[in-house]
Image (spheres, rainbow, N blue to C red):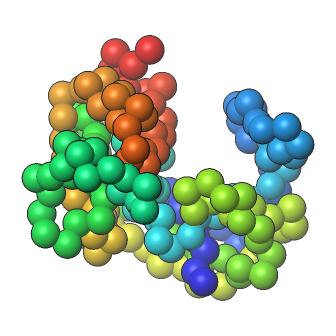
Amino acid sequence: MHLFHFSDDSDIDRFDPRPVRTPAPRRPGMDWLNGPLVWAIAEDHQQLYLFPRECPRIVMWAHAGTSASDRQAWLGDAAPGTSAIAYIEARWMERLAQAALTRYELPSEHFVDIDDAGMWVSRDAVVPRDVVRLSDLRAALAACRTELRAVDSLVPLKPVWQSSMHASGIRLRNAADWA
């Protein structure tokens, strides 16, 4: 298994546990997820983080429980072989084209799966085992079989969370007109 951490900082020698900036409501017994941790994403979900840090995005994909009608409604016009669709506001396309990220591969033996869209955490400091600079994020998304789409607004995509699709919304506070 490959676990990654993405950053616009290319000089990280060690990841030290730190609390989240904005604590999130957690299931009973899971409050520790707001405490000091190192966060990582599994390779099969890395497409969630192939964006400039503050870029608002919605990434959606079907899973075993997705209905045929939802699959058609949300993914029906995707290119063959697409496993996910990532939406960003058109105003972010130039920044995406100019952005570069560093992908740090982290040793999996330090991490536990929190059963949430490929997210893993460690309570220990972690030293990266490999570092790769990604200068073409559109190509990196395509390599993950993720189709990138630019839209004027992410707001019309809100109903995806009432569907049987899996959707991940990241940095939506930065999206225009997002309430």
In the figure, 153 relative to 50: above or below?
above
In the figure, 164 relative to 15: above or below?
above
Is residue 85 at all visible to an observer of this figure?
yes
Q: Quadrant of the C terminus?
A: top left
Judge from the rendering whether residue 26 lies leftward or rightward of residue 172; answer left or right: right
The residue lying toward the viewer, choosing from 102 and 167, is 167
**Residue 124, image x, y percentages:** 87, 67
Q: Quadrant of the N terminus?
A: bottom right
Judge from the rendering whether residue 100 lies leftward or rightward of residue 6; answer left or right: left
Judge from the rendering whether residue 1 lies leftward or rightward of residue 110; answer left or right: left
- The number of numbered discs placed on residues in the rendered structure image is 0
The residue lying toward the viewer, choosing from 9 and 70, is 70
**Residue 30, image x, y percentages:** 83, 44
Judge from the rendering whether residue 140 lies leftward or rightward of residue 111; answer left or right: left
**Residue 79, image x, y percentages:** 12, 63
Q: Residue at x 26, y 25 (%)?
A: 156
In the figure, 168 relative to 103: above or below?
above
Q: Residue at x 78, y 38 (%)?
A: 27
Q: Residue 101: which quarter of the image?
A: bottom left
Q: Residue at x 71, y 65 (%)?
A: 113
In the figure, 11 relative to 69: above or below?
below
Q: Residue 5: which quarter of the image?
A: bottom right
**Residue 35, image x, y percentages:** 85, 44
Q: Residue at x 45, y 39 (%)?
A: 169
Is residue 71 at all visible to an observer of this figure?
no
Q: Residue 143: which quarter of the image?
A: bottom left
